[in-house]
Image: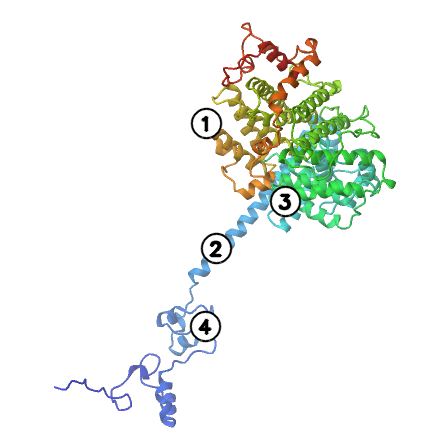
Amino acid sequence: MSAFRPIAPSSSSSTAPDARSGGEDGLLPTAEGAQDTASNPQAGTGRARKRRAPSQVSQNACTNCKKARAKCDGQDEVACSRCVSRSMADSCHYEVHVKTVKEEMVKKIRSLEQQNAELQQSTKEKDHYIESVLAALKNNERGEEAIARLRSGQTYQQVAEWLGTPPFRDVDRLSPSTEGRLQDAVQRYEQSMRVTQSPEASHNRRQSAQWTDVTHNEQLTHHLMALYFAWVHPVHMLFSERHFMSSFRNGDSRYCSSALVNVMCAMGCFYMVDQGGDEADAINMRARFVDQMWRDVDREDSASVTFPATYAILFLVELSCGQSRKANSHLRLAVESLARVNRAIVADEACELAFWGIHTLNTVWASFTYQKPPAPISPYLTVFKDVELDKEDAMWQPYRFPSDNGAAEIPSHAIEVSREFSRLNQIIHETINVYCGSKGRVTARSIMYLYKRYLRWKTALPHDLAVGADGVEMVHPLPHVFYIHIHYHVALCQLFQPLLQYKALPWNTREHLYNVTTRSALDGLKILERYRSLFTNRYMSPMMAFCIVHICDIIIRSGHTLNEHQQRAMTFALESTHDALSAFKFVGPLQYVFCQTLEEEGLVLPDNVRELMGGRISYSLEEMLDSCERVTYRQPVDMLLERLDISLGEDFGQEWQQFIEDHGAAGMVETDIEMQTSSGDATPAEASGLPERRRSPSDDSSSNRSMQISSVVNS
């Protein structure tokens, strides 16, 4: 048997019929095909195997062609040539493809959804107009005239516009995510705020259009500017409001510029909250104002008084966005630009307000980030030498929404507060120089000198800006008045905190300082709690967030066991920063570091800590740097201890004793009277309700002197 398989006959010699060589249905070749084969024997076989494709192929084949898997050239209601050639035209039907059916259904559903959304939006707008008319009729004496207008054929939109601005709550339906949708949002803002204008209001609208291209609606611009003047300007007075408003109304660019107006509106967006709780519109609108500011500031004269003010406010905007490293460079530019201001064409008052406001902001930021300010400020300069204090008609109101225009007003005292805040920061600037300067080591005399200056500052406060005997009540409970007192307590804590870790300091003296520092922090906490109860921390200066964590951090570290003060500080810090988190992005990393402090002190985080932190409980190092230019807000005590003089421990007790003798017994009856106990030998910590700290066996000092010191330093 052969090992090779038999060779199959070739196709050319095979006589077996090949179905594939026939027509499309496997039949014998047609006459035309046979003729072609006869004329060209070599190509006959190849052509017979090829199917003839129709000249025009339909994307949707008929049912017969689909079954035969053949090309189809028919269309709807027209039989294809294949069915016609086979006398099957009557059964040539077309079915819509499933994919096409689905696509058409999706398009129709989307169209219906869009129509439904437009109808709902239209209904909502109508409801808001009608509600505004009803609300105006309830509180307005023009009810009869409004009814007469409706009877005469005017629409409810026209009546609403005649009565007043439609409600601002209409913004809760705005959620633009692209440039085009944002522009629509701005237009809807403008439409929702359109009213019948008086000639004066029309003039203001023209002036608003001159200063910003983001929106030409003067009421929206004025709303954002009003938020800025209510919550930012009284705390950080970076320019003269009187001169600014004069230029703003008159179209004069000496004290007002497009860049300044746009950056003010951008800062106002942090405080703009619609009543639906949606922050998206404010965020996108803020970005538009900042972009417009960048385009305008390039054309601005760097020698104008508005130039440094613009960059100082930009610092607050970028800090609030969590971009402190970028913001710091703009703050430095603002400070350095003050030297280039052309004072020959600018009023002395406007120059001085800008000078002190920007330098003070620079010092505040340096005190929270523990760095020397790039531009020094002399502690001996007279603050507001050429500045006129607040007039009797200078008022302030807790403005949040356009409807707050009718809220009760109280005397502003803004310029007076700014003057005292600048004086306080002169002392803070000198404190920074003592701890971080190059004029030798920190001595007991320098610390006591600064402390006496702080006390004199508080004692010299005008009656309208002072706090009551309880340390909380004020003649005029203004947010900017609260802020300078809060900052005062933070400054005192920062002055003494490094000494609490100085082991060369006698235990008894260190205990006195511990009591003074903790008591000052508790007084600051009381003022913070009062502020939150009046205004909420949603409306505050961005810098107050640093005050909150600093004061509460000191109280948390005051002892090793949980007491009511620590529990109170922990709860307040997390809840108040939660209030501010929706507006100020940099607050999140501060919360994170504060929670680390709680864990280090062995305290249990609350169950709702994730909710209080906005759903996020950790941050990267880069995010910390963008929050406060350091990976922690805490005071770098270890570095500052290296600056202390070796003789400070021995000299400090003598300085304390001299301090008591200089004040005398008459000045020692103040806020800490509750510390005195019948036993007469209680430590300051025991008497004040603070955690007991370990007492050295060598402590033989007088407890009377201890309470005298506590009384004086908290007066």
The residue that mark 1 highlights is 602
* Mark 3 residue type: Asn
CA separation, marks 4 and 2? Answer: 25 Å
Nearer-N-terminus badge (4/3): 4
Q: Which mark is residue 284?
A: 3
* Mark 2 residue type: Met
The residue that mark 4 highlights is 74
Nearer-N-terminus badge (2/3): 2
Give the residue drawn at x 57%, y 12%. 701
Say if 491 sits above or below 94 in the image.
Answer: above
CA separation, marks 1 and 2? Answer: 61 Å
Horizontal and vertical percent position of residue 675? 58, 11
- In this rendering, which labeled residue sits more in front, label 4 or label 3? 3
Comparing 358 with 512, the one in front is: 512
* Mark 1 residue type: Gly
CA separation, marks 1 and 3? Answer: 42 Å
Give the residue drawn at x 40%, y 70%. 92
CA separation, marks 1 and 4? Answer: 82 Å
Comparing 325 with 661, the one in front is: 661
Nearer-N-terminus badge (1/2): 2
Horizontal and vertical percent position of residue 511? 56, 18
